[in-house]
Amino acid sequence: MLHSLLSGDYPRSRPLAAILLIILIGLALTPFLFPGSQPLNTAAKVCIFIILVASYDLLLGYTGIVSFAHTMFYGIGGYGVAIALHSAGPHWGPLALGALSALVLAILLALVIGLFSLRVRAIFFAMITLAVASAFAVLASQLSDITGGEDGLSFRGPALLRRSFQLFEEPVFGIDITGKVLGYYLLFFIALGLFLLALRVVNSPFGRVLQAIRENEFRAEALGYRVVVYRSLANCLSAGMAACAGMLTALWNDYTNPDTTLSFAIMIDILLMVVIGGMGTLYGAAIGATLFIIAQNYLQVLMGQLSEALSAAGIPLLPLLFHADRWFLWLGILFVLSVYFFPTGIVGKLRSLRK
Amino acid sequence: MSDALLRLEGVNTHIGRYHILHGVDFTVPRGQLTMLLGRNGAGKTTSLRTVMGLWRASKGRVIFDGQDITQLSTPEIAQAGIAYVPENMGIFADLTVRENLLLAARQGDLDTARLKWIFGLFPALEKFWSLAAGSLSGGQKQMLSIARAIVEPRKLLLIDEPTKGLAPAIIMNMIEAFRELKRSGATILLVEQNFTAAKLLGDSVAVMDDGRIVHRGAMAELAEDTNLQQRLLGLSMDAHQ
């Protein structure tokens, strides 16, 4: 059962398995272990980014393709759901239609980009994806009648997923099972399913070919594999998963705008998460995304508290250094240190400890 | 004389602005092991890569099993039945031994009887079955590279300097494996610098110099004619004896 679920790809390190188990249990029980909207929002963001980062790792880590268009596909998913629910009302039908349309558009766009540009050298492909993604972001802001421009689109999700909906009259383990909690579990199980699907893909014959292409595309060609076809398929698969992550983001937030889906800052975050977790291993995506999102949400708070404590103790200079506004500086330092000490990412390091 | 499985007719190859092959003509008879010999830089590897479509012939034709494959893409040439073992042990280091072999299995799975035969040729592969190929020794990597080419029957094997940089004991193992491959009826075009190995294995031979074929014939004739060896390959009378 477990072998089949994980497609035979075990963590291969006890500490790694323990961390993954803690993440899984933590995410599964967040509504009960950490009541309140902020922990639930953080957990939802972790689930979404695990999918987004895993889908990017499919490209970068497994196939060796550097793409800057990942947030574009993420945005297509978000806007697909937002436009459908905004224009046709908060029902499951428009939601399904919007999601399906976004998925098809993302995959088609990925196929076109792939077939036209995956023949060129890696650096040119990266530049092409950057140009296309920038053009898409500009288009999303300019077509304000459809996309809501810079403000984006706010909408209402289906009644079942609204905060006002109560599944049971009485709380379960002290928690009201609202539509938000149901929405979280919908998101959690979709994310889990997509992650296991990605695991299945990378451990399939198709995934093996992708890894062979990453190592040496000429050798893969000499074995009879059409590199462009495989790369394009990987691009489509990755884009489809990113679009799904975008849909979940929109559905969770009840709004979509360029900042939450299309911004280059998200692309950089994805890259950081892949590197921190470890490239070429989907478990790295789970760990990288979890650590980064938690740091993003709580490092600022912790630093603020530390700064106040240092200030109260009368220590000069340090309160300024640890001021909550400096959190990104410290995140940057943590990133540099993690790359220096864990060049193969956390997963690579944990697996090497075993040897 | 057997019929030709592979025939190169006046093949010219340019790499950038460099003209490497100048009208190369030779044949690989079906069911035989043909040696392609020559000094460093003579054009042997370029010839193999041109056959595989990794470099495109600018002039001339490559005929394989009666079909003109000159303009086919590398995957099409591989699918036509040619397996290529590159000079630098073309393994995928991050994949396991098993995964390396699975990559070459078109049916998606490995044939148990054939795998047993391969383990007979290269026992180390069975031992390190689940290990990353990158952690194997040089000789084991070369064995894996050859095993990958024969994991399913192919019409023609192109093998580039399989004994390069290997210890003498490993070279003898490799020679034994090639003998077994010959007995199985495989057609092989083998590029080799080691003249002892060439003498032991070759049925026919083509010698290259400066991008041209300068000698064709039976390997036994070249093996016996030391003057010819010296003229064609720069070997002294006692070299590699």
Image: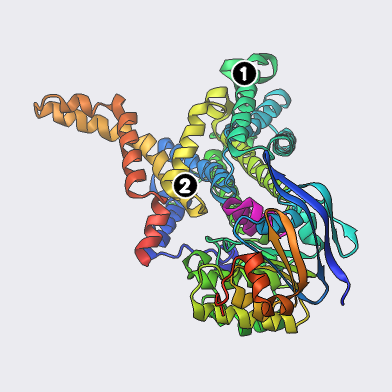
Provide residue A328's location: percent of width, then percent of height. 34, 30
Residue A292 in the image: x percent, y percent? 40, 40
Q: Is residue B221 above or below residue A345?
A: below
Residue drawn at x 41%, y 50% as measured from the top left: A345
The residue most toward the right is B66
| Chain of the residue under the numbered disc 1 shown in the image | A
State yes or no: residue A219 in magenta. Answer: yes
Residue drawn at x 62%, y 36% as measured from the top left: A247
Residue type for callout 1: Val
Instruction: Tell me if residue A300 comes above or below residue B216 in the rendering.
Output: above
In the image, is residue B71 above or below residue A251?
Answer: below
How would you classify the magenta stretch by its main secondary structure?
Answer: helix
Chain ID at mark 2: A
Residue A289 visible? The answer is no
Tell me where residue B227 appears, x and y as whole percent: 65, 72
Q: Quadrant of the C terminus of chain A?
A: bottom left
Residue position marked by numbered label 2 in the rendering: A171
| Direction from residue A108 to residue A239 in the image, left or right | left
Look at the numbered disc 2 and give the secondary structure of its residue.
loop
Residue marked by disc 1:
A138
- Which one is in front in this view, the residue at disc 1 or the one at disc 2? 1
Give the label on residue A305, or none.
Answer: none
